[in-house]
Structures are given as C-alpha cells and as structure tokens.
C-alpha cells in the first residue's frame, strides 16, 4: 500500500504486527501509542489510519497526532514518580528563560523554539544540555532537530523518563 | 602623498577601573584617583576560590572594572559575550551615542557599508576559554558551551560592535599585545584615509584578570609584587617601581572623515594628525633597551602628520611602571622631540588605571583626546621620587595645557616588539 501510494521515505509506517500480533480492534490505538512512545509520531504530525475488518469493510482517516498532555500511563517501568507534563514544561520554561531570556509564560507546548521563541541553534544546544542535566535524560544531536516545539521536547523528555 | 581625507574624533566611550563611562573615568583621572584594588575584594575572587585556584598567586591586586559590565548589559545578552566583549560593547555604545550616530543609524540615514570597526584585544576571550576548560574537566565534553568559540575568538568584540551598529565595511581586530588598542586607532585612521569607510569605531578591550594570566605575567617578572597599599603600586618613572598592575576595561573612539563629520554637523574633539607603527625585531618580550623601534614609531607619526616637534604639548606615555620600559620611553621622547622633550607635559594614566593590555592604547587614546579637548593633562600619581634617568616634565597634579594649536601624543608598546604612536591635534 505504501508503494502504491508512493509515500516518501520520511513517512514512518507502523510495523508492530511483527511482535504484537493481530490485535484486531486494538491494533490502531496500540500501534499509534507505540509510535508516539518511540518518537516516530510526534505531536502535530499527520497520521493516516487505515483498517479493514471481516466482511471486508475498509475505512481510512487522516488525523493530527495530539499534544501529549499527560505522562504515558504505564508507570511501572519507572520507580520514581514521573514529573507531570506541566512540571516538565515549567522546568523547561525556566531553562529557556535562563538561556534565551524568553518569558516563562510564553514557553507553551505549541510554541516553536525557533519561529515563536526566537531560540537560535546555539541557544537550542544550550537548552538541550541544560535539559539533559535537569531531567537526567540523554538527547542525541540527531534528535534535537526533531524537537521543533516545546511540546516535542516535553514529549521526548516524558518518553525518555518513562523508558528510564 | 596627497591626502584628501582628514580624520577627526567625534565620539568617545570607555568603561575602566575608574568609572563605567567617560565622565566618571575622566573625573577620576583628573582627580588622581587610583583604580587599583585588592583581588580578594573582587566578585571574581570568590569563584576562583570555589574552583580551588588563586590562593597561591604572588600578586593580590588588580585594577578591576569600576562598574561590572553585567550590571549594564541586559542579562541574556551579557551571558552570550565574553567579559572582553562586554566591555567593548559598553564603550562602543557610549562612543556611538556620544558621536550622535545612534539617531541617524536608527533612522536608516547612515550607510552601514561605509561604517567600519577596529576593536583590538591583546589576549581575546581568555576567561571564556578557561572557564570552559574547567567545565570540560569537571563535567565532560557535553557541558562545554556551544557559544565558546563565538565568545572567545579574538574578533568577537569587533563583531559584537558590528552587529550593534550595523557596521558592514571592514571589521578588524588588530592584535599586537599591549599596543593593540592604539594600533586599532592607527588602522582605523588608514581605513578612512583610504576611502574605505567614512566612520570607524576604533578601540581596544581586555578582560584578563584571572589567576592564569596573573600567574603568567608574574612569572615573567612583569607584574609588581609590591605588597604595599594597592593604590600606590602602579608608579611609573618612580625609583620604587617594580612592574605593572593588571587592569581591565575598554576604550572606544568614533573616528570619522572630516568631510562626513562636518556634513552632519558633528562635534569634533580632535584631529588624528599622524600615526606610526613599527616593530623592534629585538626580543619577544623585552623592549629594545635603546628604544629604536619606538623612536621610529613616534617619528613616523610626527612625519605622517607633518608635525613640528615644537607643537607637541602633551604625551600620554605607555609607561607601565616597569624598570626598563619607562626609561626606554623617556629616551624615545628625547630622540624624537629633541630639546623640546623637557617642555612637554608628560603623564602616565596607567598610574591610576593599571595596564589594560589590549585596552590600554584605547583608554589612553580617549584620555589624550580629552586632554586636548579640555586643555588639561591628567596627573601621574605615586611619583614620589622620579628616576634620575628620566628627564621629563611629568605632571604630578592635573596640569593646564597651552592654548593654540597643540599636539598630543599617545604611545603604546607591546610584547612581540610592537610600537604604535598616534598624534592627535587640538581643534579650536
């Protein structure tokens, strides 16, 4: 189907069936959750959801991946109490304020670091390094370019915390 | 050579051990106030102690900035600049406003392609380099600031000013150790004379008061180790002098073609009459004891400005309070000014500001221009017992300078054998 639609290589495709098996009606939510967790689907991305079922009924829709407002539910992987999304946002806002002088209240999830907050590339590296220390996570350089919005960064930190 | 473009001084700025601006610095100079203080009283000292360094320094004094640059600049802007760039920016902004160029710039009436910068530094962003090395050792590579390079590079102060004022002609960073600031004035003058710019912000900056440069200068026997009252330690030409006192800060002068200045009705402080730049090729650190390179620099400056030595009324000497250098410079003045040398009112403002290295020639350039403007020579303090080898008329109190067309000479000499002299002329 991906070939038939000539989807460009940058489009990520769920391949969780190889270890999840056919989960039937749960397949789309499960696959989407995993893609969000793995960073393959980010808040604001467009997602094409396609399913078919017995009797051969087909349905497809395009949705926008929502902002992650809450930490991922399964917390048993982390022994400590995870920071809430708002706590991470507020701590990140303090860092952005320190590095770039942006008012904390302006550092909201939907704001782009470059376009809205005027954080240049060198300052972004400073933010990332300070965030690594603050949140005890590692943010590889390859990942930094994907952190377009504050929400991207918060979601990344949440996932990294959850995986820790 | 036919020269059609005269260069004039239309703006002055400084932040120095005596004050955060020109007014406070000049008042301090005229009053004979010392800017030398105990390092233990400085804000930086506590951070060195935290890092476990500085306790064993053989020198416990320096001429620290009277006003912390971080109290002047907006916080986020300051944290992206090395201290040397902070000083340079503060001095340049003052000079730019003093010249009345901020209004035309903001109104888009100034062609940035005709505006240049020559902002010197002797050592560059050494504090940024060292603090990031401390971070590398303590916390690892990941924590080294991505701003390190644009902060520590030698041309950072000049580039910072270029960004501030929209200067898009040549933006230069002369580097000739302690002659750098004066060399910037000389190179900016050339830039305007050659028609490559109409306005150039020229000057020098330094922020090297840190245990490593202090230890290094002390170990090469350049710094005074005199344990007396800090305000008495910088004593050029005095028999008890034993080395210089490290200072920090910046000076900036707006140089402009006379034509450009007259066309916009700018106030003119002084004229840059002539400049001379030479090298000793004698020793990497020691001055030529006969001062031949310095003599040639002064002579060239006089010739360049077609100046009769008898018109020289004032010299702001390099005189850093070292045993050899101070005497050598006296010899240069005798060699160039002849019998008139003892009629000239000579001073070393380093007796009050300490030695600002790459900033020295610029702050002293500001002082020389103001001496002509106010017809008043600042004193040399701590000259209790003048070295008999120095036959000069050194002002020990602020001294009036004569009326009429007079010339003030600003001398600077640097490690590496660099010699720069700039001759300024008074205006009526």
Image (cartoon, rainbow, N blue to C red):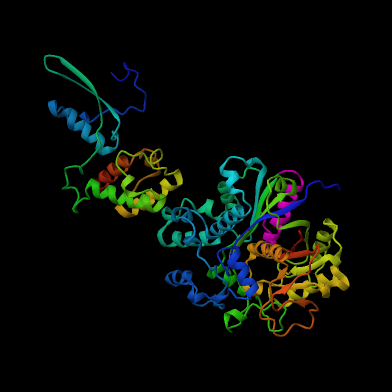
In percent of the image, x 60 and y 75: which residue is there? B34
Which quadrant is home to the N terminus of chain A?
top left
Q: Nearer the viewer, residue B258 or A139?
A: B258
Q: Nearer the viewer, residue B356 or B289?
A: B356
Q: Left or right? Give the position of B225 relative to B297.
A: left
In which image quadrant can residue B334 be found?
bottom right
- Horizontal and vertical percent for residue B222? 65, 74
- Horizontal and vertical percent for residue B419? 75, 63
In percent of the image, x 44 and y 60: which residue is there? B135
Q: Nearer the viewer, residue B199 or B249?
A: B199
Residue B102 visible, this orientation: yes
Image: magenta residue range? B174-196
Q: Magenta span has B107?
A: no
- Horizontal and vertical percent for residue B289? 79, 73
Q: Left or right? Give the position of B98 relative to B190.
A: left
Q: Nearer the viewer, residue B12 or B46?
A: B12
Q: Left or right? Give the position of B254 relative to B288.
A: left
Q: How many marks?
A: 0
Residue A136 visible, this orientation: no
In percent of the image, x 59 and y 69: which residue is there? B247
In which image quadrant can residue B407 be found?
bottom right
Q: Left or right? Give the position of A14 relative to B3.
A: left
- Horizontal and vertical percent for residue B42? 49, 72
State the predominant SS element of the stretch in magenta.
helix
């Amino acid at each position: 189907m991906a070939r038939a639609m000539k989807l460009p290589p940058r489009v990520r495709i769920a391949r969780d069936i190889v270890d999840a098996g056919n989960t039937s009606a749960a397949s789309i939510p499960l696959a989407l959750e995993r893609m969000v967790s793995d960073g393959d689907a980010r808040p604001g991305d467009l997602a094409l959801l396609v399913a078919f079922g017995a009797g051969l009924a087909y349905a497809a829709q395009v949705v926008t991946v929502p902002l992650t407002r809450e930490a991922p539910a399964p917390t048993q992987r982390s022994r400590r109490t995870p920071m809430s999304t708002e706590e991470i946002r507020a701590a990140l806002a303090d860092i952005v304020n320190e590095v770039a002088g942006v008012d904390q209240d302006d550092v909201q999830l939907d704001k782009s670091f470059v376009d809205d907050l005027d954080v240049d590339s060198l300052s972004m590296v400073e933010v990332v390094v300070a965030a690594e220390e603050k949140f005890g996570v590692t943010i590889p350089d390859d990942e930094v370019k994907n952190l377009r919005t504050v929400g991207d960064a918060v979601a990344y930190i949440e996932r990294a915390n959850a995986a820790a | 050579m036919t020269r059609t473009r005269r260069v004039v001084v239309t703006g002055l700025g400084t932040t120095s051990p005596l004050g955060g601006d020109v007014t406070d610095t000049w008042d301090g100079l005229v009053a004979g106030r010392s800017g030398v203080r105990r390092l233990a009283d400085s804000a930086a000292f506590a951070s060195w102690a935290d890092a476990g360094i500085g306790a064993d320094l053989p020198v416990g004094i320096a001429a620290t900035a009277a006003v912390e640059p971080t109290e002047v600049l907006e916080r986020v802007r300051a944290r992206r600049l090395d201290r040397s760039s902070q000083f340079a920016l503060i001095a340049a902004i003052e000079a730019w406003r003093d010249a009345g160029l901020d209004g035309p710039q903001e109104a888009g009436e100034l062609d940035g392609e005709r505006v240049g910068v020559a902002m010197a530094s002797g050592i560059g962003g050494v504090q940024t380099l060292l603090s990031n090395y401390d971070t590398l050792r303590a916390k690892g590579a990941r924590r080294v600031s991505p701003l390190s390079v644009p902060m520590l590079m030698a041309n950072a102060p000049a580039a910072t000013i270029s960004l501030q004022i929209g200067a898009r002609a040549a933006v230069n960073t002369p580097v000739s150790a302690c002659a750098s600031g004066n060399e910037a004035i000389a190179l900016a003058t050339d830039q305007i004379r050659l028609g490559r710019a109409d306005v150039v912000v020229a000057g020098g900056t330094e922020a090297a008061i840190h245990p490593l440069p202090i230890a290094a200068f002390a170990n090469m026997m350049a710094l005074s180790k005199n344990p007396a009252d800090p305000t008495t330690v910088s004593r050029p030409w005095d028999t008890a002098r034993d080395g210089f006192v490290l200072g920090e800060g910046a000076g900036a002068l707006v140089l402009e073609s006379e034509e450009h200045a007259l066309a916009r009705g700018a106030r003119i402080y002084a004229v840059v009459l002539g400049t001379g730049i030479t090298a000793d090729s004698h020793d990497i650190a020691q001055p030529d004891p006969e001062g031949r390179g310095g003599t040639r620099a002064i002579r060239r400056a006089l010739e360049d400005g077609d100046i009769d030595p008898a018109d020289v009324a004032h010299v702001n000497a390099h005189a850093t309070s070292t045993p050899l250098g101070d005497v050598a410079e006296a010899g240069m003045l005798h060699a160039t000014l002849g019998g008139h040398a003892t009629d000239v009112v000579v001073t070393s403002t380093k007796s009050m500001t300490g030695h600002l290295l790459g900033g020295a020639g610029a702050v002293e350039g500001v002082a020389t221009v103001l001496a002509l403007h106010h017809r008043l020579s600042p004193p040399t303090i701590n000259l209790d017992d003048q070295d008999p080898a120095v036959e000069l008329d050194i002002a020990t109190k602020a001294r009036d300078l004569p009326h009429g067309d007079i010339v003030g000479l600003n001398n600077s000499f640097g490690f590496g054998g660099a010699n720069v002299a700039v001759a300024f002329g008074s205006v009526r």
